[in-house]
Amino acid sequence: MSAPITASAFAQALPLLPLSALHSKVAELRNSISHLISSNNELKPFAEAGDQECIDAIEENREVIGRMEERLELVKAEVERRGLRWEEEWGVEEANTQEVGEGSGEEAERAQLNGEGQQQQGRRGLSDEELELALRQRLGEESMEL
């Protein structure tokens, strides 16, 4: 099993991704956090009874949740850097309604979250490995230390 990409490599990749991919990543991270919290709740009675494996699993899950929350903050910063408003309930939303220009990629990205292209349920986000691969392809293998 490979280690997850570092927070700095994750942050480097974010400006290269379309808004739809950021939205998918937010959904994926939130889903994973939810599952880890649920797992910890199920393990808690056993940990309280002294089961060391459950105690260790809960601690490991907490560490992973912390890394995922850090990534959510990095995505939030990228979304806001693009001039968009971060909405906790939905993830991201258009900051203003000015048109960016007909046919521009940015306009298409904004449309993804504002009507025609609403985020589809069940759509898979990028895994850490896919994100790392995209970053390596864009920047070149030799220019990155992960």
Image (tube, helix red, strand yellow):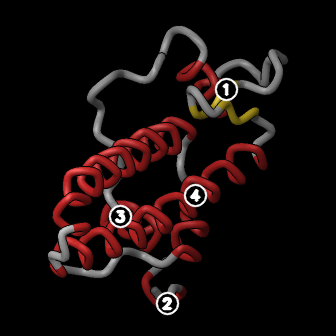
Q: Is residue 15 visible?
A: no
Q: Residue at x 51, y 85 (%)?
A: 144
The answer for how far apart the CA atoms under marks 4 and 2 are is: 16 Å
Could you tell which of marks 1 and 2 lies nearer the N-terminus? 1
Q: Residue at x 75, y 34 (%)?
A: 84
Give the residue pinned by disc 2.
Answer: 145
Q: Label 1 crowding class (10 Å Cα cut-off): few <14, some 14-19, many 20+? A: many
Give the residue pinned by disc 1.
Answer: 93
Q: In the image, which is nearer the foreground, mark 1 or mark 2?
A: 1
For residue 61, which quarter of the picture?
bottom left
Give the residue pinned by disc 4.
Answer: 14
Residue 36 versus residue 111 in the image, above or below: below
Q: Is residue 76 visible?
A: yes
| Amino acid at dot 3 | Asp
| Amino acid at dot 4 | Leu
Could you tell which of marks 3 and 4 lies nearer the N-terminus? 4
145 left or right of 36 in image: right
For residue 16, which quarter of the picture?
bottom right
Name the one closer to the observer, 95 or 87: 87
